[in-house]
């Protein structure tokens, strides 16, 4: 299985073919459980993540959150960021990064089939983790969470302990040189922790490519995205 780096570090550092037009945006309705895949512009660690991860239709993602509830025209997103597991207003989430047209670099994925039945329980599980700390070392065996790990564990717990999304070995190396990205070397040196090369993990890119996730909306154009939204 192809190696990749965990994609949630944005939170520590900072706190498709066609973009949907205004008319499309006004008619689209988020649902609880929707996954918001985000291309962030947050410095060299996000760049390193996006270099070694592949999102759906080539998109470069470095963060993901899940819609916890929808209140009329407003929505609340649950996510793991530097402050830990928190709930964030949709407008604040979307404002973090914009494409050349000034639109949020976020696309929306929606689970299909039997997984839709898990949505209420998955949200309840995710909300039970509110206040948990951010997982700065990207370990799957502690009580903290990075962004995609939060969703992995929420789906797994809701599914009676059976994983829904796949894990794969992480890598923190530049594929062009085979050497660890300097930004990661400095990051882990500051933490005083070893780089978890080869340890199991997952990232927003791999989650967006899951066969049971359908892209239903694009707020803007993530870097690299060559896809479109099916009607």
Image: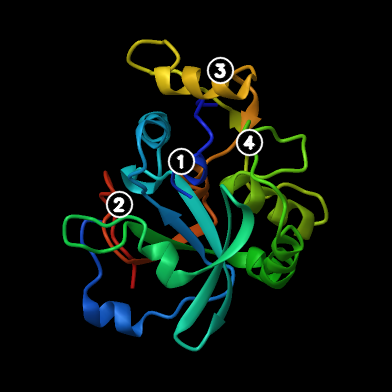
Circle nearer the viewer, 3 or 4: 3
* Label 3 vs 4, first from the N-terminus: 4
Of 208 and 125, which appears nearest the observer? 125
Which residue is labeled 1 in the image? 13
Q: CA distance from mark 2 to mark 3?
A: 31 Å
Q: Earlier in the sequence, mark 4 or mark 1?
A: 1
Residue 135 percent coordinates (x, y)? 65, 39
Q: Quadrant of residue 120?
A: bottom right
* Residue farthest to the right, as pictured: 160
Q: Earlier in the sequence, mark 1 or mark 2?
A: 1
Of marks 2 and 3, which one's residue comes earlier in the chain? Answer: 3
Q: Which mark is residue 207?
A: none
Q: Secondary structure at mark 3?
A: helix
Residue 35, how many percent across, how many down?
51, 61
Where on the picture, by quarter, is residue 29? bottom left
Q: CA distance from mark 3 to mark 1?
A: 16 Å
Residue 214 point in image, percent of width and height: 46, 61
- Nearest to viewer (mark 4 / mark 1): 1
Q: Is residue 122 visible?
A: yes
For label 1, the crowd category at 10 Å Cα-Cα, with few meaning under 14, some 14 to 19 and many 20 or more, is some
Q: Which residue is mark 2?
A: 222
* Mark nearer the N terminus (2 vs 4): 4
Q: Residue furthest left?
A: 101
On residue 189, which mark appears?
3
Measure how far apart labels 4 and 1 are at the Cα level: 24 Å
Label 1, secondary structure: give it. helix
- Is residue 54 found left or right of 194 in the rendered image? left
Look at the image and name its color scheme. rainbow
Frontmost of labels 2 and 3 is 3
Residue, disc 4: 167
Please say if the residues under marks 4 and 1 sit with CB atoms less than 8 Å apart.
Answer: no
């Amino acid at each position: 299985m192809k190696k990749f780096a965990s994609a949630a570090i944005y939170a520590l550092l900072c706190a498709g073919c066609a973009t949907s037009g205004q008319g499309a945006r006004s008619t689209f309705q988020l649902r609880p459980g929707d996954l918001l895949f985000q291309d962030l512009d947050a410095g060299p660690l996000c760049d390193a993540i996006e270099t070694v991860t592949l999102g759906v239709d080539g998109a470069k993602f470095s963060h993901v959150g899940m819609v916890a509830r929808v209140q009329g025209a407003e929505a609340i997103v649950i996510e793991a960021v530097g402050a830990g597991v928190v709930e964030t207003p949709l407008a604040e989430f979307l404002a973090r990064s914009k494409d050349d047209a000034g639109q949020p670099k976020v696309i929306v994925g929606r689970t299909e089939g039997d997984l839709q039945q898990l949505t209420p329980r998955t949200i309840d599980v995710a909300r039970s983790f509110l206040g948990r700390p951010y997982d700065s070392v990207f370990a799957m065996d502690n009580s903290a969470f990075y962004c995609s790990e939060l969703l992995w564990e929420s789906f797994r717990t809701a599914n009676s302990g059976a994983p829904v999304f796949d894990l794969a070995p992480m890598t923190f190396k530049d594929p062009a040189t085979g050497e660890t990205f300097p930004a990661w070397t400095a990051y882990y040196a500051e933490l005083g922790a070893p780089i978890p090369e080869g340890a199991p993990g997952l990232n927003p890119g791999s989650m967006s490519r899951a066969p049971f996730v359908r892209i239903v909306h694009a707020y803007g154009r993530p870097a690299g995205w060559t896809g479109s939204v099916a009607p």
